[in-house]
Image (tube, rainbow, N blue to C red):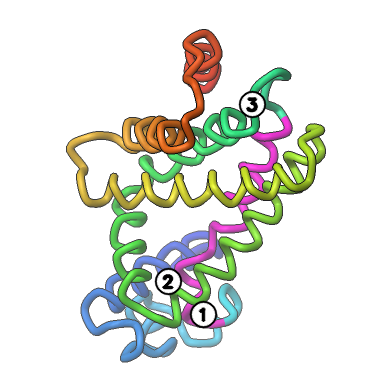
Amino acid sequence: MPRSGAEARRRLQQAALELYRERGYDRTTTAEIAARAGVNERTFFRHFPDKREVLFDSEADLRDALVRAVAEAPEGLRPLDVLLRAFRMAGRILEENRPFTEPRLAIIAVTPALRERDTAKAALLVEALTEALRRRGVPARLAGLAAQTGWGTFHHAAQAWIDDPSQDLQTHLLRAFDDLRELSGAPRPAPARAQTRAETER
């Protein structure tokens, strides 16, 4: 039996991931997840409200970290460069947890109920990033567009990383934002970009 709440939570997440991959999300019950983790079903519901939320446990922490990174970004950066700086920080978290991140994204991609939850979580994250940009003085209309576009670009880079693990997420992320600028016809000012990369790697 797990000796701590944190250990039980981790084992429940791992058990859910394994079962979703083996049987599919729809055919897996909370009782089976609990049994695989070595706890009872009551313990499962002490940690998670439902079997979808097992795969979204860190979303609130990620959202808070991104908002904090936007708030702490140096003055003078353009909105997309502020977001790139924040997403590079988030990317390092995903890379460190790739054994969980990769199968999690794969399961969500093929499960309608999880895609629905993922869309709802993404909407909350975009809303939070929009507000964080507004607090930096970015006009509301531009803040919303930047947050929505930035998150879509990050998601695109994360999927590219899953499909092509020969390059790290940071590389895919930088390429995706370069492609975004290419599509929009926006210039790539070398000094500003170099500053962004250096600061995010401290």
Q: Residues within 10 Å of mark 3 (few under 14, many from 20)?
A: few
User: Which kind of residue does numbered mark 3 sit on?
Assistant: Arg
Q: Tell me the distance, in whole angstroms, between the alpha carbons under discs 3 and 2.
A: 41 Å
Disc nearer the start of the sequence (1/2): 2
Report the quarter where the N terminus lies: bottom left
The numbered dot on residue 117 is: none
Which of disc 3 and disc 1 is earlier in sequence?
Answer: 1
Q: Local crowd at mark 2 within 10 Å, few (<14), some, or many (≥20)? A: many
Residue sitting nearer the eye, 191 or 169: 191
- Under mark 1, the amino acid is Phe
Q: Residue at x 57, y 28 (%)?
A: 81
Give the residue number, with chain letter if any, for mark 3. Answer: 78
The reply, left or right, for residue 177 in relation to residue 43 is left
Q: Is residue 116 above or below residue 58?
A: below
95 or 139: nearer the viewer: 139
Vertical side of 159 occupied by 108: above or below: below
Q: Considering only order in the chain, which callout, 2 or 3, is on the residue closer to the N terminus?
A: 2
